[in-house]
Image: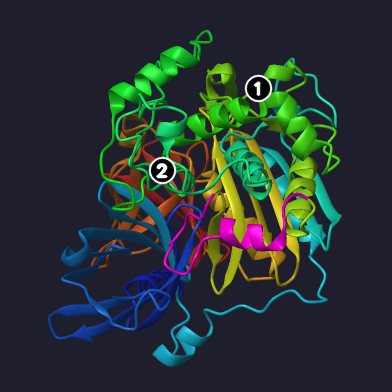
Amino acid sequence: MKIKLLLVLLFLAQICHAQTIEGIWKGDLDTGGTILPVILNIKKTNTGYISSLNSPKQSTKDIAIDKTEFINNELTFEVKSIKAIYKGIFKKDHFEGNLIQNGASLPLNFTNKPTTADSAEKTTDIPYLKDHAIDTKKMDDFLDYIAKNKQGIGSVSIFRKGQEVYKKSFGQDQIKNSSYDELTKYQIGSISKLMTAVMIFQLIENNKLSLSDKLSKFYPEIPNAAKITIGSIMNHTSGLGDYVGKSLENNWLFGKPVGNDAIISAIKKDGVSFQPGEKTQYSNSGYFLLSRILEKIKNQPYHVILKENILDKAKMNNTFSVLDNAGNTFKPYQYKNNNWSEVKDFNFNNCIGLGDITSTPTDMNMFINALFSNQLIKKETLEIMMPQKDEKHFGRGIMKFPFYNITYFGHGGDTAGTHSSLSFEPVDQLSFAVTINGENLPHNKLYIDILRIIYNQDFEFPVFNETKIPASELEKYLGDYSSKDIPLALKIISKDGKLLAQGSGQPPFPLEYIEKDQFKFDDAGIKIIFDSEKHQLQLLQGGKTYVFNRK
């Protein structure tokens, strides 16, 4: 019976992992704040697998997959037409992996609940909240889980119909020698641009500026200024570049204030990469110029204009420009060598009007609710700011963020060490603001999981317990093992930094690290304990212990 029990369980474990993967699998592709439902259709043939991919929100046509393989619990497929490769590991009932495209690695997991193509496509729509409550306990549990696993530090605020219904900070107590309170602010990066855009439209409402005005009216020395309009700067179609630069390493704006003249010289040197309206290209340079135009017309410094036209009107008592020297702002951190260490960030005097503002999630929500309730600009003006039908992401200061069939409007903001998101959904009149000053789990993944909780979508908390063990440490476990208890040989091997076990005549199965010298394989209820000094391992399964000796 002992022999039969072990062999059967090992065999069943491999059937689980070597099972047919035929059917329709559903996944959500995180493209950086936007979630695209993806359907993978896999069919078994005599020679292997053939498959196709579809994104219902983008097209009704299937994309043929050129090569599909499922070996040792790893699914890989290649789509040459979009220059993409997928690699995912099978775990119990789903695949966890990434779609690698044009050098970018995008998280993409597939569930193992096959259904028909029609029903899978229908389930991509999710219902609006309407009168349903948000599961605040689950939100608390999730954010506590993120903090406990050293995956993030930050704050969340959620408003419904203009009132705050949820507020929580998480992980800040992990920072050594840090003092903070509920009024401590975060750098919110490019969400500053949304406030600048609102103030530009206030000028337009007062007939002091027009979307059709040329940049040459204010900065004739900028290349192509006679063709670039205020409107094209606002929706990032001007052709202007990015004076901040592509690399954050030793960035020229990290040190002392460089001054407006140096920045304008850099913008002139960059020139333009296309004619206005030909393309869309995010431009920090454009919003730097808009902020200076705002100051020229108002004949006031940026922070004074901000306070009079946004902060006071929206009752944002805890939001400031860098020019206010307000203090009490969280430092940014990264998780490195099992510790949170401070990250060097911009001197925000070099980003006034496009990335210098500090705020709290509550204040950010007060701002966007004031904006969408027409307290800052008229309704018809807001409609002009919004992305139009032919604009995928950018409007004139407002971006759109699709979450399945639901669309949010707002802006994101990143500095060298902080990440923020602010958005408003008009149907439910729901807004949420998130600020992260310590990132381990990718911030876009965190935003999306928060939305899943808001809309009561099924999802499992991310798994973070996959401890990476140096290859030199794994070597002491490798080898061929045999047991006097049962006529089954066991081979311990390593692949890609992970330990695997292989019974004689069976495919290998992965071993998950538990603690020193201990591993497990949950799908077969197996636990393995190594004793390197005795050159042995103990295999525990079904309440029985089997001793194996290394040959």
Tell me which residue sits at (43%, 84%) in the image. 114
Colouring convention used in this rendered image of the protein: rainbow
Q: In the image, which disc is placed on residue 453?
A: none
Relative placement, left or right, of 531 versus 105 is: right
Let me know if residue 338 is in the magenta part: no
Which residue is denoted by mark 1 in the rendering?
A: 331
Relative placement, left or right, of 141 versus 254 is: right
- Describe the element under mark 1 as helix, strand or loop: loop
- Dots 2, 1 in contact, CB < 8 A: no
Q: Please name which of the two marks, 2 or 1, marks the residue nearer to the observer.
A: 2
Tell me which residue sits at (68%, 59%) in the image. 424
Across and down, in percent, residue 333 comes to: 59, 26
Across and down, in percent, residue 107 comes to: 42, 55
Which residue is denoted by mark 2 in the rendering?
A: 282
Residue 41, relative to residue 292: is it above or below?
A: below
Tell me which residue sits at (68%, 40%) in the image. 147
- Quarter of the picture holding the C terminus: top left
Query: Magenta stretch?
Result: 376-396
Across and down, in percent, residue 16 comes to: 40, 74
* Snapshot quadrant of residue 347: top right
Relative placement, left or right, of 514 versus 170 is: left
Across and down, in percent, residue 304 comes to: 74, 25
Distance, label 2 to label 1, CA atoms, is 26 Å
